[in-house]
Image: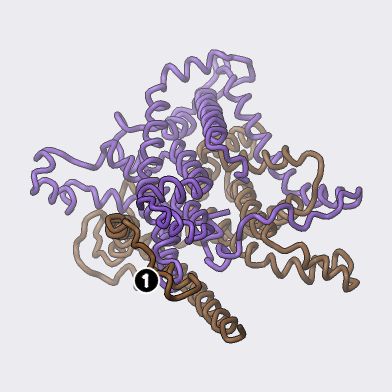
Chain colours: A brown, B purple
Amino acid sequence: MSARAVLPGGEAPARRRRRAWSLGDAIVPVFATLAFAYLMVPIAYTIAFSFNDAGRSNLVWRGFSLDAWRNPCGAPQVCQSLVNSLLVGVIATAVATVLGTLIAIALVRYRFRGRAGANLLIFLPMSTPEVVLGAALLAQFLAVRVQPGFGTVVIAHIMFCISFVVVTVKARVASLDPKLEEAAADLYASAWLAFWKVTFPLLVPGIAAAALLAFSLSFDDFIITNFNSGSFTTFPKFVYVSATRGIPPQANVIGSMMFFLAFALVLAVQLIAAVRRRRAAAMSSALS
Amino acid sequence: MSIAAALSSENAASVGPASGPALAAGPTRRARSGAYLLLLPGLAYLVVFFILPVVALLATSLYVPVPGGDVGQFQPAFHWQNYPDAITAFWPQIVRSFAFALIATFAALLIGYPMAYVIAIKVRGKTLLQGLLLVLLIAPFFTSFILRTVAWKQILADDAFVVTALKWLHLMPEDGRLTATAFAVVAGLTYNFLPFMALPIYASLERMDIRLIEAGGDLYASGLNTFWRVTLPLSMPGVVSGTLLTFIPASGDYVNSSLLGNPVSTSMIGQVIDSRFFRVSDYPTASALSVVLMVAILILVGLYVRRAGTEDLV
């Protein structure tokens, strides 16, 4: 029971009546462990099958092999589709992050007419299923006779990323202390300078989180992409299309690489944050 | 919001209780025009590439075939009959989509809540363990969801471990199978949207003062009673956004039903829209079904949000 450690006053728990919670105490962690296993098993499969000595089909285990890892671009189109996805992801993330951050700042900092309408316009794309977003954009592109391809995919990805960026950055803006900017104003900073030197640096973690989210949404999107890509192929589309014939193990290699990369990155961030917090806690207890 | 907030626990921790209208500048005219300048590019983008496409979708849903034209040639009209036609032809898929999405949402809530509870409450204070579990919770986002769905196909395959074990235990008839069944589709949907359910709940529970649970115990409430009267109500905002983030994408999904299901008894509305567009070039029917799906979801979400009493979704 870690909560006790948080509580001030060390002796209190000993005299406190034990809560009749033992059944839940036992069941919940067991259940959660099973749930985490459920979450991990398909990932383990994906990684394991990157080492499969696959012949024509990578659906059945045929023995260990490093062939696919030695030559990740060995299957036709795998690497091209990966490059396409990265390119779409980077452009869509950059544009959506800028547009969404501006909206988020406006929504939190200003009272203005039409606020409810703006909120609705942000909320609607998130509460519309992807298949409808994809179909609507396709209907539009058909109506104005635009050939689907790279450009239309980028347009679509920017569209569905904006709302998620707004929501993410908004949470960060709302958590900032307004007194910080007031203090800057007291110190004779202009409104712009106060924003740029005080508020913006504090927003950076939120903006970074939003950009990461946008990139992962874009990189993993299949349904909207499928509607608006024509013959242009992204990585998820490549995997889906080849699923009927058998996915080459190289696709699993790329999936595994992405997994290890992201896992290492996030783990590093978590560790740094944990160490920092611990250091801050030690510092504050030393001071008090 | 919650997903991204949970991407880094540092960020999640800093999103404390909502601090009201922070940084509210005075409503001077200059400030207001500043707001519009900030809003303009992004909202204009959404008008052009979201609102106008939805209008185009509505228009397309009323088109009629060009008389004597080729397949896929349509002309503008106000043929409202497209809607009853589309609904009578595909109502089983519509009903099935909502049923599958509902079951998957419920299952994800049952599985995701304990996960969120363990991360936010049980291991609170154990920073490293909490961080590790959070990373595990978002780990599915690190690999392609289509690759993971294909992995499910392998896991549930006829000659794979799960089916063999179930048959050996006589929990499943000799000719039973899991692939190409409704069970596989719902399991896949549950799996794919589980983090979207657990993360917002985690974000709500993380903010909760743990002493409230102890107070419940001190007031002689049983553990279950404390959970039901204290913890659960406090986590309702997370439950509401989690269920929405699961139900909405699940009802329109067709990756799970086409990879894990069969074309006859498990096809969902997304599959129909896709094949109407691309296999038979029947744009009006596909558009009409899309509009039906969108309107149905907006109504359901509206009713649900009103009932759950959470206005603060965005």
Q: Residue at x 70, y 39 (%)?
A: B48
Q: Which residue is mark 1?
A: A14
**Crowding at mark 1 (Cα within 10 Å: few <14, some 14-19, many 20+):** few
Q: Residue at x 24, y 59 (%)?
A: A55
Residue nearest the observer in this picture, A27 or B213:
B213
In the image, A78: left or right of B75? left
Numbered label tally: 1
What chain is tagged by disc 1? Answer: A
In the image, B282: left or right of B66? left
From this view, report whether residue A267 is shown above or below residue B48. below
From this view, report whether residue A168 is shown above or below residue B9. above
Name the spot of residue A69 as percent of width and height, x first.
34, 70
Q: Residue at x 31, y 53 (%)?
A: B151
Can residue A248 be seen by looking at this rendering?
A: no
Q: Secondary structure at mark 1?
A: helix
Can residue B83 be seen by looking at this rendering?
A: yes
Residue nearest the observer in this picture, B65 or B68:
B65
In the image, B152: left or right of B50? left
Residue nearest the observer in this picture, B247 or A239:
B247
Name the spot of residue A54 as percent of width and height, x first.
25, 61
Residue A146 sits in quarter: top right
Residue B218 sits in quarter: bottom left
Name the spot of residue B140 as percent of width and height, x first.
41, 58
From this view, report whether residue A155 is shown above or below residue A41. above
Name the spot of residue A241 as percent of width and height, x first.
39, 47
Residue extending furthest front? Answer: A15
- At label 1, the amino acid type is Ala
